Amino acid sequence: MAPIGPGGPSGPLVTARVGSYMDALESDLRRHVHGKGITVVRIGDDIAVVVRNDRLFGPSGALNGDDVLEPLGAILDGYVHTSVWVNGFTDTAGSPDTNLAVSQKRARAIADALTHEGVAAQRITAQGFGEAHLRIITGDGRKEARNRRIEIVLKANPERTTATR
């Protein structure tokens, strides 16, 4: 699939242009992937794309999110000056160790899928947090779909220039 985004500015991204670069990325994300269990949130110059696990994984746990990952990968492939942080989270059902392992496995699966969709692997970091950072506070052993999610945090990577004297 060809990149959807504008591909950013020609040449390096400079710090002064980060805001407008991320504005364009946010606009493309909202136009092509927002809705249906996917939320796009702007946090300063960073963007978080939050996707419920049921939009990405089938009941057996197998990856099943091409309708989300293909357009997302196409957009991110065009914005080469961004780092992509794929973070996995679970609810409190299951043991903390199992939840951590599941969240790590799911984050890695999404990172690999984005690489398959054309996003350069060196731009992507995957991490699982298990049941840490719950969106909905529950007691132990509780199923809560809103806590089972992937958060993809996008950060601009402007070229650093050094001033000469």
Image: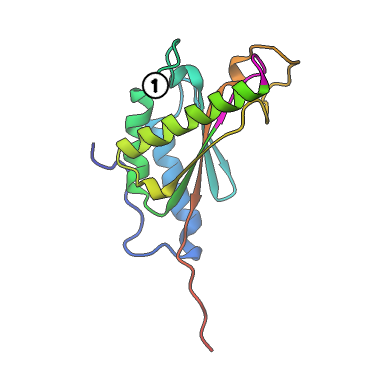
Q: Position of residue 89 (x, y in %)?
A: 59, 27
Q: Residue furthest front?
A: 97
Q: Nearer the viewer, residue 83 or 127?
A: 127
Across and down, in percent, residue 81 comes to 41, 55
Q: In x, y percent, where is residue 103?
A: 55, 27
Residue 160 place in picture, x, y as percent: 49, 68
**What's the image's color scheme?**
rainbow
SS category of the residue bearing label 1: loop
Task: Work out which quarter of the rendered image holds the N terminus and state it.
Answer: top left
Q: Classify 141 as above or below 84.
A: above
Could you tell me which residue is drawn at 44 percent across and 19 percent down?
Answer: 55
Stretch of the chain drawn in magenta: 88-95
Q: Is residue 69 above or below residue 161?
A: above
Residue at the spot of label 1: 63
Residue beneath the point at 46% across and 24% down: 35
Q: Looking at the image, which residue is at 36% across and 32% down?
A: 113
User: What is the chief secondary structure element of the magenta stretch?
Assistant: loop
- In the depicted view, which residue is nearer to us: 115 or 44? 115
Residue 39 appears anywhere in the view: no
101 left or right, relative to 30 = right
Q: Quadrant of residue 5?
A: top left
Q: Label 1: few (<14), some or many (≥20) within 10 Å? A: some
Disc 1 residue type (three-letter): Leu
Q: Is residue 31 visible?
A: yes
* 51 is within the stretch colored magenta: no
Relative to 151, does residue 121 appear above or below in the rendering? below
Q: Which quadrant of the figure contains the C terminus? A: bottom right
Task: Please name whichever residue, 130 or 43, is drawn nearer the observer in this view of the structure.
Answer: 130
Residue at 43% of width from left, 22% of height from top?
56
Q: Is residue 59 above or below residue 50?
A: above
Q: Residue furthest left?
A: 2
